[in-house]
Image (spheres, rainbow, N blue to C red):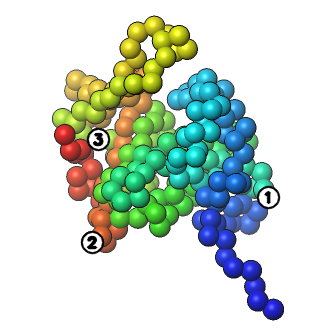
Amino acid sequence: MASDPPDPHEVARQGDFLISTDPCLLDVGLIHDFLANRSYWATRRPLEVVQRSLENSLCFGLYERGRQVGFARVVTDRATFAWLCDVFVLEEYRGRGLAKWLIESVMNHPDLRGLRRVLLGTRDAHGLYRRYGFTPLADPVWLSGNSPGHDPVRHGAGHRPVSLTRLPGHTGLRLQPHPRGLVHGVAAGGERDGRICKQDADRLPT
């Protein structure tokens, strides 16, 4: 009797735990609750914004026997660039190596291999990300942007820039909305070998 074909969304499995990119498995309510109510970077993020972000990203769900217990989202063109964001493991599942396994699975995903650059912004867990080649972006890089969809009624009066600003005497960059947040980057070897390396990791094109 023929066996079932492999699940194309299954990324990794360890015992009762599964990492999958299947959007149908995502617990949108749980993801929204954590981001809006328990994260420092997405406080009060509306449900419709969360839903739209999931629909337009490569999402990795971490599950225990079907129950979602962790998450990571990647915004990418699947060719040159990716932004890793919204990474979390539920509090009761921390300290078991699941976050390391999740990040390792993300970084090894076929759609993300050979990218020229992967970035993330974080104010904690620097040691975790350093394991996978992430290092603080060095001077004199400046990254800046604005929020064209900023709603002064919902988010407060005035233009609220989203920018990464160089600190005097500091080798990293701070994400202004989070005073202790460093932006990290890795550069991959592209089609040459696909390995994470420091080449160009501290430079971004202007």
Quarter the C terminus occupies: top left
Circle nearer the N terminus (2, 3): 3
Quarter the N terminus occupies: bottom right
* Residue marked by disc 1: 65
* Residue marked by disc 3: 137
Dot 1: within a 10 Å radius of its alpha carbon, few (fewer than 14), some, or many (20 or more) residues? few
Circle nearer the N terminus (1, 3): 1
Residue displayed at 42% across by 30% down? 181
Dot 2: within a 10 Å radius of its alpha carbon, few (fewer than 14), some, or many (20 or more) residues? few
Amino acid at dot 1 = Arg
Q: Toward which corner of the image does residue 149 lie, by quadrant?
A: top left
Circle nearer the N terminus (2, 1): 1
Element on which disc 3 rests: loop
Amino acid at dot 2 = Arg
Nearer the observer, 118 or 5? 5
15 with respect to 103 (left or right) = right
Element on which disc 2 rests: loop
* Residue marked by disc 2: 192
